[in-house]
Image (tube, rainbow, N blue to C red):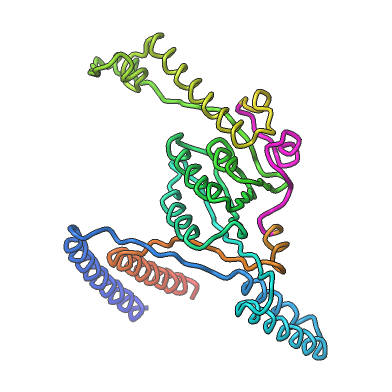
Amino acid sequence: MEFLSNYGLFLAKAVTIVVAVLFVVIGVVAAGGRHKKEVGGQIEVTFLNDEYDDHEHAIKSVILDEDQLKAEHKAEKKQQKAEKKQKKGELEDPKKRIYVLTFDGDVKASAVSSLREEITAILTVATADDEVVLCLESPGGMVHTYGLAASQLARITKQNIPLTVVVDAVAASGGYMMACIGNKILAAPFAVIGSIGVVAELPNFHRLLKKNDIDFELFTAGEHKRTVTMFGENTDKGKAKFVEELEDTHELFKSFVSEHRPQVNVAEVATGEVWYGQRAIENNLIDDIQTSDEYLMSKRSDSNIYRVSFETKKTLQEKLGFAAQSVTEGVVNKLVERFSSDHKF
């Protein structure tokens, strides 16, 4: 037991030294990189057909006998030969190209920074014979950022490139604003669709401040520069103006939906309500019930499918920080494991 205790103490000291050195290195790197430009990213492209083929081969290698596997292998070689001829232009009607994008939206639509890079890359090569598929998930968020995200998608349709939007879980509010840009909208059976409305909420601490004899001063120039605040006393006039602004934003939202989805009866659906997949079809909010996997798999045989993503490079200090965290967690886990073992004996 004494040996184990000494060993644990030595290990703890060693970890402390290693972590200290890593923090010093991270500090030096961070200080040296303060005046450097922000690290960018790069476009990464994955050929999804190969991924699907790998899955298929893994299953067939187990369920098929040797003769069947040989026949499959022969058919694959024939198919590969035909595809090579297509690339060389020896055959007409080459496979359609599908570019797959993923947008996982938060309140700020932060993913728009990557989306714009991905769309720019695709537009350098895509033609009207191709297709872009957006796998969209978002409960909505800020008006201006989701407006920008929708504008990025509009760059695709303006080039007459078909855009299909697929929703597996949720596309509500700003998320549905983005979906409206698509030439076709698909959704899973219980995906949440709609919420064509506008909401704003904020706490008000005026009475709490007043109770504690704390003054809050707000200075503005312009009658409606600040209609409601968190700390000041909100007047009826200010509240009315704020609601007026919300209503105006709602009208803009409804006009946007009408422009891009004229088949939708906006007067009936622009109530802030949401609908699940099948009900969304009945209200013309979507065009069909289909998951993203189902749709892409249905295109596998006659299309070349590429996933396009913009990956941000990690800075050196981020990498070192991750390394320090991994080392610390690993050693702590070892100590816990050792400590637990001692008590078991």
Span colored in magenta: 272-293
Quadrant location, the N terminus? bottom left
Spot occupied by residue 75 in the image (x, y as percentages of width and height): 76, 84
Spot occupied by residue 23 in the image (x, y as percentages of width and height): 23, 65
Residue 275 forms part of the magenta stretch: yes
Residue 88 forms part of the magenta stretch: no
Spot occupied by residue 266 in the image (x, y as percentages of width and height): 65, 27
Looking at the image, which residue is at 47% across and 57% down? 118
In the image, is 320 to the left or to the right of 136? left
Looking at the image, which residue is at 28% across and 77% down? 10
Looking at the image, which residue is at 63% across and 35% down? 194
- The total number of labels drawn is 0
Report which quarter residue 312 is drawn in: bottom left
Looking at the image, which residue is at 62% across and 59% down? 129
Does 175 appear above or below 220?
A: below
| Viewer-closest of 240 and 179 | 179
Does 160 appear above or below 84?
A: above
Residue farthest to the top?
A: 236
Does 34 appear above or below 208?
A: below
| Viewer-closest of 50 and 209 | 50
| Viewer-closest of 280 and 23 | 280
Spot occupied by residue 2 in the image (x, y as percentages of width and height): 33, 78
